[in-house]
Image (spheres, rainbow, N blue to C red):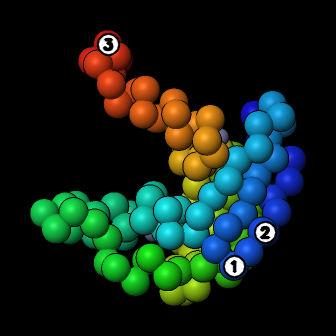
């Protein structure tokens, strides 16, 4: 499974068409807040008590992106951040389409215990 195309819809929305025909939608602030780089991981663990990353992540937009190896996409955000390497697997988990959002809600139910 890999991206066939990445399309910018607006400054803060893009879609990815996957090799398995799924079309994902992503919002810049959502990806920014879920950035997997070491800096953000650390920031999140610090800010856990106040529940979220810094608020300016809400107004962040996409500046660009590039394919990284054959396994990930690196996004650049308007706040200058560009060290977040999102693996395909991670990206699929972050998909914001209706279908995937439903799955997330289901996973948060009692079934989760089984994993
Ligand atoms: Zn980061
Ligand atoms: Zn999806």
Q: Which mark is residue 8?
A: 2
Q: CA distance from mark 1 to mark 3?
A: 39 Å
Residue 115 or residue 106, whichever sits in front: 106
Give residue 82's quadrant in the image: bottom right
Q: Earlier in the sequence, mark 2 or mark 3?
A: 2
Q: Do tag 2 and tag 1 residues touch (Cβ < 8 Å)? A: yes
Taking the image as drawn, is residue 69 in sight? no
| Residue drawn at point x = 57 percent, y = 69 percent | 28
Task: Locate residue 29, reporting x and y percent.
Answer: 50, 70
| Residue drawn at point x = 58 percent, y = 37 percent | 100
Residue 56 in the figure: left or right of residue 75: left
Q: CA distance from mark 2 to mark 3?
A: 37 Å
Image quarter hosting the C terminus: top left
Residue 61 in the figure: left or right of residue 5: left
Task: Locate residue 54, reporting x and y percent.
Answer: 32, 78
| Mark 3 surroundings: few (<14), some (14-19) or many (≥20) residues within 10 A | few
Assign a secondary structure to mark 3: helix
Question: According to the image, label 3 marks what residue?
Answer: 114
Residue 28 in the figure: left or right of residue 43: right
| Mark 2 surroundings: few (<14), some (14-19) or many (≥20) residues within 10 A | some
Question: According to the image, label 1 marks what residue?
Answer: 11
Assign a secondary structure to mark 1: loop
């Amino acid at each position: 499974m890999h991206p066939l195309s990445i399309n910018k819809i607006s400054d803060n929305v893009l879609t990815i068409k996957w090799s398995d025909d799924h079309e994902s939608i992503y919002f810049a602030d959502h990806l920014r807040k879920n950035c997997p780089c070491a800096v953000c991981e650390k920031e999140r663990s610090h800010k856990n008590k106040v529940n979220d990353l810094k608020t300016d992540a809400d107004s962040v937009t996409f500046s660009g992106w590039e394919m990284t190896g054959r396994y990930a996409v690196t996004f650049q955000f308007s706040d200058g951040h560009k060290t977040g390497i999102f693996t395909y697997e991670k990206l699929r988990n972050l998909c914001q389409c209706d279908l995937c959002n439903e799955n997330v809600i289901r996973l948060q139910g009692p079934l989760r215990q089984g994993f």
